Image (cartoon, rainbow, N blue to C red):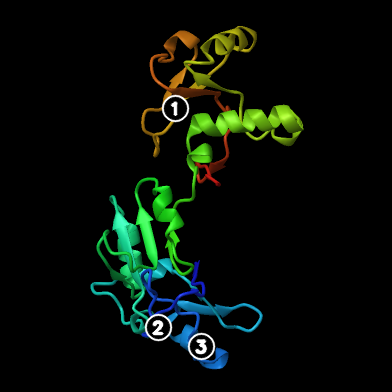
Amino acid sequence: MMEIEESSCPSESGEEAGGGKDIRGSSVNSETSEKSSDANLSVLWTGSAGKTPLIQFRADALLGLETPPDHPYSGNHRLTFKLSGENRLVHTLLLSHGFSEVSLMNARFNVYWSGSHIQMSEIRALMPHQRINHFPRSYMITRKDRLCQNISRMQHAKGVKHFNIIPTTFVLPDELPQFRVHFRKKRGTWIVKPVSLSRGRGITIINHPNQAKSDEPMVVSQYIERPLIVNALVCFTTLH
């Protein structure tokens, strides 16, 4: 879902000076809006007065679509998006909800979905009605080494029992000596992952520190011997 905020600087035409379109100032009353929401399944009106529009993205909008459907609301308000990187699913989902694509150089947009981190200058220039898919310094929880270091810092500050949420983990190559010492006390199977890759790329299983590559950044964690199984498959959930 995406809430469309009220902008502080609309132009005479009702469009935003900084880009995209602010739909919060619509003259449609809440009763009519609710009926419109039921019709196109895209907009919910929230807030104490029922005047805050919330766009609801539905996965079933992708099913069996050869051409983007007609969404009067997003079409009338000319909601726009721009993408960088390979984001075919996001591209299709936004089109299926009536958004129009603009170029990366266009400052008039509602949604900017980037495949890489967004510059602070771009974040500072955002208008209240514009949304992006990154927030500053998100790598502090999305990079495996930074996440491990931050959790370790909180364990020391607040106590291990309050942050006992990950297996025993070491960041290589910096903590390779500590890993060797721990391994002598507690042998077993360990899983090694690159610090910044995703989708299972570069993962290896080891049973001795000498098997871990020490010339590139990695995290090594004690392997969970009895993971959660759903329909005979190992599953996991990533929460940020």
- Which circle marks residue 193 in the picture? 1
Q: Neighbour class for label 1 at 10 Å: few (<14), some, many (≥20)? A: many
Q: Neighbour class for label 3 at 10 Å: few (<14), some, many (≥20)? A: many
Q: Residue at position x 71%, y 27% from top?
A: 156
Say which amino acid is labelled 2. Gly
Q: Nearer the viewer, mark 3 or mark 1?
A: 3
Q: Nearer the viewer, mark 1 or mark 2?
A: 2
Q: CA distance from mark 2 to mark 3?
A: 19 Å
Q: Secondary structure at mark 3?
A: helix
Q: Which residue is mark 3?
A: 33
- Where residue 229 sits: x, y (%)? 55, 41
Q: Which residue is mark 2?
A: 14
Q: Residue at position x 23%, y 72% from top?
A: 66
The part of the image, by quadrant, that contains residue 102 is: bottom left
Q: Residue at position x 45%, y 23% from top?
A: 218
Using the rendered image of the protein, determine whether residue 63 is visible from the camera's viewpoint.
Answer: no
- Where residue 24 sits: x, y (%)? 50, 80
| Residue in front for this viewpoint, 99 or 8 | 8
- Where residue 89 sits: x, y (%)? 33, 58
Q: CA distance from mark 3 to mark 1?
A: 49 Å
User: In the rendered structure, are the residues bearing label 1 and label 2 in contact, judged by CB atoms less than 8 Å apart?
Assistant: no
Say which amino acid is labelled 1. Lys
Q: Secondary structure at mark 1?
A: strand
Number of dots carrying numbers: 3
Q: Neighbour class for label 2 at 10 Å: few (<14), some, many (≥20)? A: some
Using the rendered image of the protein, determine whether residue 24 is visible from the camera's viewpoint.
Answer: yes
